[in-house]
Amino acid sequence: MPQLSASLSVTLSGVPTGTTASVVINGPSGYAKTISTSTTLSDLGSGSYTITAPPIRVPGTQVDTVSDAIVTGSPANLVPGSASTAKVDYAQRAGTGMLWATNFSSRNAFGFDAATIGTPGAQSSAPTVTLTTNVGIGTPASPAIAFSAKGDMWIGTCQNTAIPQVLAKYSPAKISSSGTPTPDVALTLPVTNGSYDCAAALAFDPAGNLWVGMYHGHVLRFNASDLAASGTPSPAIDLTSTTYFTGVLDLAFDSSGNLFVASYYSPVISRLSASQLLTSNSAIVPAVLLTLAPGSGPGGLVVGGDGSLWVSDYNHSTIIKLKAADLGASATPTPALTLTNCHGPEQLAFDNAGNLWVAAYDTKNIFAISAADIATGGSKTPLTTLSGNGALSTAFGLRFNPGAP
């Protein structure tokens, strides 16, 4: 008697307009099939079939969104003559499609949606999402913010001379609406080192490791495996320098895996080579030292799409552009251009349109300089200014979720 075959119907819904799904079905004997629309697969052999669907990144004018797939009916265990079903439903990941900011003097993180940041002129409406991040001890600020590839928001607390400090993770579900969410993960920094008292900058590397700029002389790495559960992990890497890392306020990776460090009390931008990031060093000398104008107080970094480095100088209320060709060797490079009258700039971020967003600590707002205006330098009228209805006191941290591609 012939062996009866089985079938599997996979229904896709919620695929964002203008994108293509990539749903993979794997089964016995090396069976593999990729589909992009609802499909019925026939003449299948018996066994277990798994359905997986990666997230879809949806392009936006200024910031992308991400849609995640919820798969039901996987694995599907097929037997001869059976007709099984599975569903793949896509929904926008909470917290994406937004510009996020923190202020230095409180525990708040603020999210502004695409419609708000896309409206020119002065915008005084309240943030789309306001979070109070009650982590750490005493009344620390939460200046540091970063997003993992999975869309988790990480916050670093800061209170000088007080230990222990905390790194806290909030999953997308926890940042979907305003409130005081409980962290999904809280990493307590070791109390054995009294200078681990202010996590002022966060950045993820491509491997998912979390790098932490400590205000008092350290750049730390916590491995991706350390980020899954609460605890007190020791940093996998501790790079220490009281000369170059005093007052760390921002970190930025380039496409080659080198790490730039901005330290407020040193008019020098440090570039740590990818090889220097592999081993702890208690007295590290960065591979490249880029000396800025005397009296500079660097507070923000962002790497442009052309490999250039943009640096905010709080002390001079300026933002400078350093050409990619000038970043490979220690020197005092001449800025390719300088933006003036930037009101105490701290962290920086580019949107998809090439506009430069600035956290303006002194004027308690966030503003964008258009891509056309940043090409020429000088004093510019902002394209958009967000005051957050007065919420952005001492604006500091600034990140898009997800970051510009």
Image (cartoon, rainbow, N blue to C red):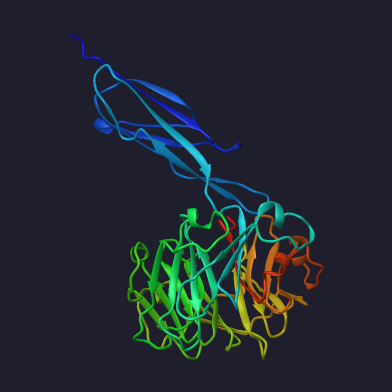
Tell me what residue is drawn at x 52 percent, y 88 percent. Answer: 246
Residue 17 point in image, percent of width and height: 60, 36
Q: Is residue 385 left or right of residue 347?
A: right
Residue 191 point in image, percent of width and height: 36, 84
Above or below — where is 304 with respect to 334?
above
Residue 392 point in image, percent of width and height: 67, 71
Which corner quadrant holds the C terminus? Answer: bottom right
- In this rendering, does residue 257 appear at all? yes
User: Which residue extends farthest top?
Assistant: 1
- In this rendering, does residue 329 appear at all? no
Tell me what residue is drawn at x 58 percent, y 69 percent. Answer: 108
Above or below — where is 217 with respect to 38?
below
Q: Quadrant of residue 328?
A: bottom right
Above or below — where is 404 with respect to 348?
above
Tell me what residue is drawn at x 56 percent, y 64 percent. Answer: 131
Q: Quadrant of residue 19?
A: top right
Which corner quadrant holds the N terminus? Answer: top left
Picture mark count? 0
Above or below — where is 48 with respect to 328?
above
- Judging depth in this view, the residue of 32 and 69 nearest the camera is 69
Q: Is residue 193 left or right of residue 176?
A: left
Residue 295 point in image, percent of width and height: 67, 90
Q: Is residue 27 left or right of residue 336?
A: left
- Judging depth in this view, the residue of 77 and 185 nearest the camera is 185
Q: Is residue 372 left or right of residue 140?
A: right
Tell me what residue is drawn at x 64 percent, y 48 percent. Answer: 60
